Image (cartoon, rainbow, N blue to C red):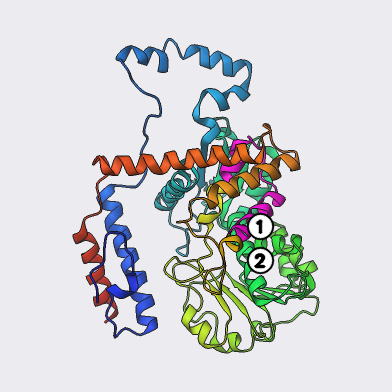
Amino acid sequence: MKELSLTLENLEEAFPSTFTPEQLAKAKTVFLKKLSEDAHRFYQGKIQTVPKAPVPGFNWFNVWYTPGVSKVSTDIRDNNDTSFDLTNRGNLVAVVSDSTRVLGDGDCTPSGGLGVMEGKAFLMKYLGGVDGVALCIDSKGKDGKNDPEKIIEFVKMVQPSFGAINLEDISQPNCFRVLDVLREECDIPVWHDDAQGTACVTLAGVINALKLAGKKISEVRIVLNGAGASNTTIARLLITDGADPAKMVLFDTKGSLHSDRLDIKADTRFYRKWELCQTTNPGKIPTIDEAMKNADVLISLSTPGPDVIKRPWIRSMAEKSIVFCCANPVPEIYPYAAKEEGAFIVATGRGDFPNQVNNSIGFPGILKGALMVRARKITDTMAIAAAHSLADYAEKRGIHVNDIVPNMEEASVFPHEAADVAMQAIKDGVARVNMTWDEAFQKAKKDIEHARGLTKSLTEKGFIAPPPAEMIKTALDFAIKAVQ
């Protein structure tokens, strides 16, 4: 057992060598939760507001504020689009949530989602050079039920202050209506990262996994376990990118989706699920154990595991099977178990396992690309362009069974992705501003380097304190005791 450094490298080696793979996975989860709790308390959150303009002298407040700023107000009054040039609006995203489905923890009350939304803003800034603001709202109506119309109204009210909206952790079926209405009725991009972001990054992983397995997307049999916002959007993007819906089976908590699921048809709020009922699973395969036989790909975003996905199901899959089990914080089956049952490639949503399929490599670049060209929306083709950008970037630097997509440490992937998304926005006719691929790449690269440099400088100068080593040791000891 080795002492764990502040960078949290070689996390596995910090635990006793006598731990079984399952004990090690559990210990890492306990450690990360404990350290997260203590670190958030130590820093009191992870986002602050920092000026981007200087103060050469106090008379400059007459420029940054009244009376000088009156000219900025009247300029924007006369042409609202100048707000993107004269304020930070053009690089500012609202991370909006009612916190009704936070990670795997369900409804955490509105303020319970703040840690996740701040985290989203943190990643936007550090990885994409985009400023983000966490806005957790109470969407309950007078009847005490969460009302999607309240979220829609709120976003429409705040959109004049932002360049884009990132919806997050909104439970289904509300999330479907909220996104679809706002995408059409807002004049700025509205992006649901749980749905579109997860779908984009998953598609990127599937593209490269199929390359390594020597299989074509149009020919493979795909099982999707879970039919929430993530998997229904994944299915839609897979089909749009060439997958055969007739070779696809989705499962929700009541069984497989197919054209006889009248319970789904009857509830019009689940119209996205009903669309898939009509196009997938024409053979009406009823059970997941049957659907998994000779399946090429499993994509599971359902209940945190382990043992939600059974070993025999993996064993029954086709040769060179691809398994994506991305529930958080614990995947539906541990990677070591899936590998033992013959899986060729295994991906999860966690960074401490190989092949992390995580939104963090998607939304920072996607939002940056949309913001740079002042897009009015993010189309499905823009999301697919981002998926191929990620897959192509990874393939060019080399992929293998334990490394199918880029990771957050590869800083150059984000400006590449942003530029590709910007070009697709221009092609789709939703951009207000035209630029070349190289112009978009260089701008994104500059902004990302600035964001990372700012964080580094604040840390080096002591304005951001390093995490105490004792805090890490305390979390490590806590995790070991919890598992032993």
The picture places residue 263, in percent across and down from the top left corner, at 71, 69
Query: Image point 53% across, 69% down: which residue?
Result: 403
Q: Amino acid at mark 1?
A: His
Residue at mark 2: 207
Closer to the N terminus: mark 2 or mark 1?
2
Is 236 displayed left or right of 175 in the figure? Answer: right
Which residues, given as a range, are shown in magenta?
Answer: 366-393
**Other residues around mark 2 within 10 Å, as few (<14) / some (14–19) / many (≥20):** many
Q: Nearer the viewer, residue 55 or 158?
A: 55
The picture places residue 150, in percent across and down from the top left corner, at 57, 43
- Residue 39: give its label: none
Q: Residue furthest front?
A: 397
Is 278 displayed left or right of 471 in the figure? Answer: right
Query: Image point 24% across, 62% down: which residue?
Result: 472
**Other residues around mark 1 within 10 Å, as few (<14) / some (14–19) / many (≥20):** many
Residue at mark 1: 388
Contact? badges 2 and 1 (CB < 8 Å): yes
Q: Residue furthest top?
A: 67
Query: Image point 30% across, 40% down: which residue?
Result: 458
